[in-house]
Amino acid sequence: MDNWLMFWQFLLIAAVLMFAVLAIVVAIGGYKDLRALFQSVDAQHEADKGPDA
Amino acid sequence: MLDLGTNFTGWDWAIVVIYLVATVVIGLYANRYITDMSDYIVAGRSLKSSIGIATMLGSEIGLVTVMYAAQKGFTGGFAAFHIGLVAGLAALLVGLTGLFVVPLRRLGVMTIPEFYERRFGRGVRILGGTILALTGILNMGVFLKAGAIFLTGLTGLSDPNAVNIVMTVLILIVLVYTTLGGMMSVVITDYIQFVILSIGLLLTCGLAVNHLGWSSIVESVKTIHGEAGFNPLHGEGFGIAYILQMALTAGIVSCAVWPTAVMRACAAKDVGVVKRLYIWSSIGFMTRFIIPQFLGICALAYFLKVPEAAVLFTDEGDVVNNADLTLQAMPIFLSQILPVGLIGIIGAGMLAAFMSTHDSYLLCWASVLVEDVVNPMAGEKLSQKTRILLARVFILLIGAFLLIWSLWYPLSQDLWDYLAVTAAIYFTGAIALLVGGLYWSCASTVGAYAALITGGLAVLALKPVQQLLRIDPDSLGFAIKGEHVVLGTTVLALVLMLAGSVLFPDLEKESSDG
């Protein structure tokens, strides 16, 4: 039982730390990606309209 | 219903309302980006890594997941962590190998049934799409109920009419921004929800440990669950068959077969992004179980010392066998320990998670019905405008069904069991078609039909169905466990795919061999 407890304790701490780092990285990166996404979709729509638009 | 009062105040309601209003505004704003079905369903295939991860986890870390994971932690102790562990490892495996998701992205399909048509023909697509949509809608049929239980527990809102009104308002808000914005608004709101919920869950874990103390938490699990609370292989706990089922359902199926997750892969910019998406998301797939399960364990430790919560435990010192009560444990625990302000943020984050899961699933099932059932039946002749309109109509109809079903259907078994079985009706056949279709050139249309139909056997895991067919424990003298039915149906579907393909190969293949 103690070995299992030690394993789950380690897993819990690792999970919390990894999730915290992931949240920070994704929050910052996701904001940049969103801006790029809007620009990309706008550009695609402009291209679809063609030179006559 | 356990009634211990709550720390939720008018300030917290204000936080929740401000968040919900902002969500609707975002959905309306995103509407201007929609011109065709590709934009509506997969955001124009422009999703890059970070936003892809945020939106995947924003949808997959839903209120329902948090609720049933917390319930598992409450009823299973630390041993329940095995579910998160196998889920994370499975997602990592998918990311490293590209299992299912990379070939699907390379094909450029928008949905799994679209793949069915390319590989096995239009009839398989229509049947597969119908099964997928119906089981998916049934699967999400209890989400509103789980949301109601959470809201009741956290806010102390005990008037059934008030709860039903709030649930109705929430589903209407989801319908508004999903109908108008499609995947674009889903992406934006999922991102915001992921950030808010991540901060909220991490803070809550810290507060819970600070409030209870680690030793007290461990002792509580020892007292109630004994060794089974730590050892997932223990005979009185989960057992090996359950662990294998979790590796399949919470693992491979959740990240690589379940359509909402696969849709994210289809929305990724390229194959490289797909793999990075899954490698990094494996952390989320693991923690989405472990962190809420830990909160469920903390709830166990808390209520063990509260005399008014004796209804959660039996006279023998076990956790009571009542799904509604054990589902309430985590939200009521949060209502007791979280301070004003933070409880509002958690409430907003969780309701946001609730809505983001709904918007993803509504979009998914509506697009399956349009793209994989109606449009193929119409000979692929529907215009973009008609398809978007139809998708929006289906979203509204599904929303109406959810409201009626979730508020009326009596949940007579564990939430996770209901979800696993309804999902199994779809995925047991889908796994066979993906394995055969993507990795075996001899997989045939007859084999595909046989595998799809076999999935229906998964309903035998539902207790009401067992009672109807007189195969319940009272009739047989022994219990047919859900994990055995799911694993057995999966194997049978694979066997029938193999047998059907060998005995009835596709005509083109036969003539080329001849």
Image (cartoon, coloured by chain):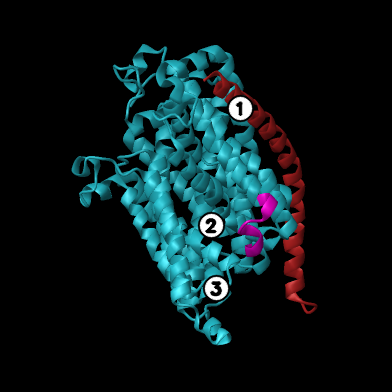
Earlier in the chain: of badge 2 and badge 3, it is 2
Identify which amino acid the numbered label 1 is placed on.
Answer: Leu
Which quadrant of the structure image shows residue B112?
bottom right
Which tint is chain A?
red
Q: Magenta segment, principal secondary structure? A: helix
| Image quarter in which the C terminus of chain B is found | bottom right
Chain B colour in the picture: cyan
Chain under callout 1? A
Name the residue located 38 percent from the left edge and 46 percent from the top edge. B484
Residue B102: in magenta span: yes
Q: Which residues are magenta?
A: B95-104
- Find numbered disc 2 in the image and state the secondary structure of the residue it sits on: helix
Magenta segment includes B140: no
Which one is in front, B412 or A52? B412
Residues at marks 2 and 3, CA–CA distance in whole angstroms: 25 Å
Closer to the observer: label 2 or label 3?
A: 3
Task: Name the kind of residue labelled 2 in the image.
Answer: Pro
Are dots 1 and 2 on a single chain?
Answer: no
Mark 2 on the same chain as mark 3: yes
How far apart marks 3 and 1 lie (CA) works out to: 45 Å
Mark 3 highlights which residue? B442
Question: What residue sits 68% from the left and 62% below the top?
Answer: B45
Residue B478 placed where, x, y %? 26, 40
Q: Nearer the viewer, mark 3 or mark 1?
A: 3
Residue annotated with mark 1: A12
**Residue that carries the numbered disc 2 in the rendered image:** B259
What amino acid is at disc 3? Cys
Give the side of residue B111 with respect to residue A16, left or right: left
